[in-house]
Structure formats: C-alpha cells, structure tokens
Amino acid sequence: MLAAGAVLPPAAGATDFTATFDSTNQGFLTAQFDANGQNASASPSIFVGSGGNPGGFIRHDDPDSGASEQQAIFVTPVEPVPADYGATISFDLRSTATSLRPPAEGWVYITVAGASSGVYCAFTAPTASFTNYATTLDADLPCWKNIVGNADATQSDIDAALSAGIRQVQINADFGTGANEDTDLDNFIFDDADPPVEREVSLKYKRSAKAFTGIVSQDEGPIADSCVDGVEVELYKESGDQDQLLDTDVTDANGKYKIAKKARKNKKYYAYAPGAGADPVCAAEASKTIKPL
C-alpha cells in the first residue's frame, strides 16, 4: 500500500529545513516504484518557476496508467534524528488527479521511514488548489500509523523510524490511477520550533484609484498582532517563468496596505507577505490571484 522504506540516501541532512522553491528544487527527488514498493528509481524533482503559492514549486507529472501505472513520492532532503520527536511538518499541495486510489493511497500523506519500516500520517484526498497540510511528529496524534500493519504508531515506533540507519521524510505524489496527473508541492517546512502564526492576505483592485488594496490578518496567538502591524506586503504580476515584483507597502496597525499601480488587461496579480522572525514566527502567506481587467 504505502511506500515501505527508503529508496536511496537523502540528498542532504537537516533538522530545521524550509523549502519555498524560489529558484531551484532545493534538493528534492521524485521516486517511482511498482505496486509492491519495489524497483524504485529516483530523479531530481521538476522545478517550475512561477504559479506556486506563490512563486516557484516542484511537480510530479504522471504520464502512465493501467498495467504500467507506477506510484510516486517526493523525497525531501531532510534526515531526521531522534531529537526531532515533536517536530512540526507542514507543506502545501495540489493535484489534478480525479480517479483516486483507495484510502489512504489516494490521500495526501507524509511518511517518516527507515530502510524497512516507518510511520505515516494520512490527511484527506487532494484538492485542485493549493491546500496546507500540517502535523506534529507525536504519537498522541491519531493520524500516525505504522507502515507495516497500519496499527496506531507508538512513541517507540516513531523513535525507531527516527533512529534507523537511513531516514527520510517523504510525501505522496501520486493519487490517481489515470495518466496525465500533475501533483505540485510548495512551502515545505520541517521545524522543531512552535508552528508559525498563520496569516491571511486579501487583495482587491480599485479602478477609480488605480490601486491595489488589502488586509493582512492572523490567527489568534500569544504574539497578538505582531504579524499584522508593520508587515511589508509585496505585489506580484504573474509573468512567464518568473513572477514580477511590482511594488511593496507596509501595513498599518490594522493590517491594511495600499499599492498604487494600474492593472493591465488580462494580467493576473497576487500579494505576498513573507515569513517574519527567525523560526519564522509569522508564516508566509499569499493572497488569491486576481484578474482585475
């Protein structure tokens, strides 16, 4: 069912790791294998420079179906260690898959695996738009299961996966049984710190003022409004392989911003609030893409 075991040594080791795929695939691999989890092969993940959440992202393009259908996973460059028990894992994913495999093969899931065993956490079926998936590497969360047997994972099971000779963090990249399925991954975070405060960014265009306006808001948290006030918001226009940064503005105490730019016909725009803080404390977030004219 699920990928049982590492397919090859990780590309690099890291405990705290963030991949936003601004200019490269950041060492991610895509591995493919048969229905028995055998005959695995891996190659660098496809990097796409624009259209992500925001900016660049990586993609698995699944060309096969039927008897030749293989399964695929994204292999991250993270090599976790026992001290990473309790770490936060987060990523954004979308897929064009329609004829889904049965649960949990057809669901979004993340695996922490050694050479012959490991644990996984399954979420839900993928969506056509980027959706954030996040969990904590903690046996108290019921989503964590053993790859072998699918029983609830204990802390000993997770510790064993984190202590194996070869350790990897993997994300499912193949949800359907048909051909021409695209799976896209963005904003992968493996972090021992507390999860960053989630934010929302809105974007509107006022034709009369020839200006883009919006608001940055945040989930309630212990740091109050520090992720809202004084945020430098970036306005982008989607443009070929590299989205174009048009201008920036700093939010007021209520999270409001305004960027005076005339929208062009048939062009798409989005606003982006970068992550802030060393961990980061404030999560990076982009608005929905709009086409004003």
Image (tube, rainbow, N blue to C red):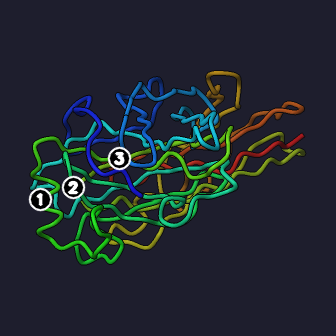
- According to the image, label 3 marks what residue? 170
Where's the N terminus, which quadrant? Answer: bottom left
User: Depth-wise, is mark 2 or mark 3 nearer the camera?
Assistant: 2
Return the x and y of residue 111 as percentages of the image width and height: 33, 54
Give the CA distance from mark 2 to mark 3: 13 Å
Q: Secondary structure at mark 2?
A: loop
Q: Nearer the viewer, mark 2 or mark 1?
A: 2
Say whether marks 3 and 1 touch (CB < 8 Å). Answer: no
The residue under the point 71% across, 50% down is 213
Question: Is disc 1 placed on a helix, strand or loop?
Answer: helix
Residue 264, picture quadrant: top right
222 w.r.t. 114: above or below = below
Residue 117 visible, this orientation: yes
Say what amino acid the circle numbered 3 marks.
Gln
Of 79 and 200, which appears nearest the observer?
79
Circles 2, 1 touching at the beta carbon (< 8 Å): yes
Q: Which mark is residue 117?
A: 2
Q: Which mark is residue 160?
A: 1
- Image coordinates of residue 220 in percent, x first then y, are 43, 73
Element assignment for label 3: strand
Q: Position of residue 144 (x, y in %)?
A: 31, 69
